Structures are given as C-alpha cells and as structure tokens.
Image (spheres, rainbow, N blue to C red):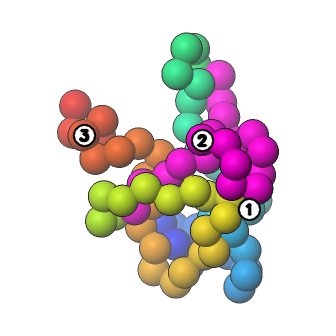
Amino acid sequence: MLTFEGSAITATSGDSVLAALLTHGLLVRRHEFGDEPRAGFCLMGACQDCWVWSGHGGRLRACTTPVVEGMTLFAQPPAARDE
C-alpha cells in the first residue's frame, strides 16, 4: 500500500508508481498551461511528464519507480503544496 495526495491505494508487487496510480484512476498532475489532466507521456522514463514527489521532498519518475510498501507521494513539490 502507498499514499498519494493523502489517499491510500493498493498496488501489486512489481507495479510502477504510475501503473498503481492509473489503476486507481488518479492523475499524476495537471498541464502547466491549462487544467487538462496529465498521466505520463512516454511511459519509459525519457520525458518529464510523470514526476511525483516523495514525502521526503525528492522527486521520482512514476513510470520507472517501483512501488514500495509505505510510500507517501504527492503530485506537487513541497513548496507548491505550502502555498
């Protein structure tokens, strides 16, 4: 189990963070020039479209990061959440 934006979600062992989020219908982020949902682009770690931030403040590529039990993740960096 992991937490994304305060919601607990389950994942299968070996899932990427992005697969777990999409399985539960969650958005990774919104488009920076509008309000359109974004959920990753290349799905192989080559673009910048699926960044998520850990509870520790570091960012991760959701498409290439495997789920780890107890992860706490956010769609925005800490500074943006504090605004």
Mark 2, other Cα within 10 Å: few <14 / some 14–19 / many ≥20: few
What's the residue type where badge 3 is placed? Ala
Mark 3 and mark 1: Cα distance apart in space: 26 Å
Which of the two residues, 69 or 79, is positioned nearer the viewer here? 79
**Disc 2 designates what residue?**
48
In this picture, residue 30 sits left or right of residue 83: right
Mark carried by residue 19: 1
- Point 28% across, 47% down: residue: 78
Write down the region rendered in magenta: 36-54
What's the residue type where badge 1 is placed? Ala
In this picture, residue 82 sits left or right of residue 40: left
Mark carried by residue 8: none
Locate residue 1: give its quadrant. bottom right
In the rendered image of this protein, does residue 37 appear above or below residue 1?
Answer: above
Mark carried by residue 79: 3
Taking the view exactly as shown, the residue that stands out farthest to the top is 33
| Of labels 2 and 3, the one closer to you | 2
What's the residue type where badge 2 is placed? Gln
